[in-house]
Image: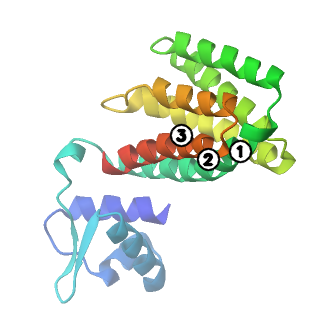
């Protein structure tokens, strides 16, 4: 991956300036490709482009010191997955508030209880229970396309969340309250509150990932 190779090269040279030509030659790519990689890294705050001086690795924020480039790239991929998931689940929750059957709501209540019971236990089992609850919400929206989109996200989500919980220096606090608020809104048949609860949950998670 060009971006990963570029950031490793910039970190290797450390405080010394790196030019676009040096980067292109070292990576064996054209200058336009090298330029795009550096622009991506600059947007993420991993490098600083000083016109007339060169390209420098930035000093990481205090909260990120001790983490590797691979940590940053992994977190970026998880953020992207969560952004797509947020779009699917916000609309899914809004529709589910008016379309979920009493039996589906009862099933969600049981799935949420199972999720909460597994918090702090085996990571894989907890993640599977969490995804089952969210899948039940989206499925109850009665929109086949939303359900298919969630199905396509399930495996990358399972891997991303499991990796996040297992490998983050500090595991994020459980979001049991967010899930309870969502289900309460669904049971109250309140689409706006269901969407709001989903937005609050995902915005908090995405913001946490971006600032770590």
When the figure is inspected, residue 211 is found, relative to residue 175, above or below; the finding is: below
* C-alpha distance separating marks 1 and 2: 12 Å
Q: In which quarter of the image is the C terminus?
A: top left
* C-alpha distance separating marks 3 and 2: 9 Å
* C-alpha distance separating marks 3 and 1: 12 Å
Q: Name the residue under label 3.
A: 197
Residue at image x 68%, y 50%? 91
How many residues crowd around disc 1 within 10 Å: few (fewer than 14), some, or many (20 or more)? many
Is 134 or 39 nearer to us in this picture? Answer: 134
Work out whether mark 3 precedes mark 1 in sequence or the reverse, and give the earlier one.
1
Residue at image x 86%, y 46%? 144
The x and y percentages for residue 118 are 54, 12
The x and y percentages for residue 106 are 75, 18
Side of 195 relative to 96 (left or right): left
User: On residue 121, which mark appears?
Assistant: none
When the figure is inspected, residue 194 is found, relative to residue 184, above or below; the finding is: below
Q: Mark 1 points at which residue?
A: 92
User: On residue 192, which mark appears?
Assistant: 2
Work out whether mark 1 precedes mark 2 in sequence or the reverse, and give the earlier one.
1
Give SS at disc 3: helix
Q: Which of marks 3 and 2 is in front?
A: 2
Q: Nearer the viewer, mark 1 or mark 2?
A: 2
When the figure is inspected, residue 75 is found, relative to residue 28, above or below; the finding is: above
Give SS at disc 1: helix
Side of 43 relative to 157 (left or right): left
């Amino acid at each position: 991956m060009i971006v990963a190779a570029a950031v490793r090269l910039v970190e290797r040279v450390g405080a010394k300036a790196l030019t676009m030509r040096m980067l292109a030659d070292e990576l064996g790519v054209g200058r336009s490709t090298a330029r795009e990689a550096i622009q991506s890294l600059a947007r993420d705050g991993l490098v600083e482009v000083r016109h007339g001086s060169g390209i420098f690795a930035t000093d990481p924020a205090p909260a990120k010191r001790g983490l590797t480039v691979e940590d940053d790239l992994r977190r970026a991929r998880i953020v992207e997955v969560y952004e797509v998931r947020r779009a699917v689940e916000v609309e899914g929750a809004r529709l589910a508030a008016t379309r979920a059957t009493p039996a589906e709501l009862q099933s969600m209540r049981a799935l949420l209880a199972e999720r909460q019971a597994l918090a702090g236990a085996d990571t894989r089992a907890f993640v599977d229970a969490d995804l089952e609850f969210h899948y039940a919400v989206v499925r109850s929206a009665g929109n086949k396309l939303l359900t298919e989109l969630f199905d396509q996200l399930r495996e990358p989500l399972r891997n991303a969340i499991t990796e996040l919980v297992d490998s983050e220096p500090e595991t994020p606090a459980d979001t049991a309250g967010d899930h309870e608020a969502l289900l309460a809104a669904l049971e109250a048949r309140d689409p706006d509150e269901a969407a709001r609860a989903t937005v609050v949950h995902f915005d908090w998670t995405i913001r946490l990932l971006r600032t770590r």
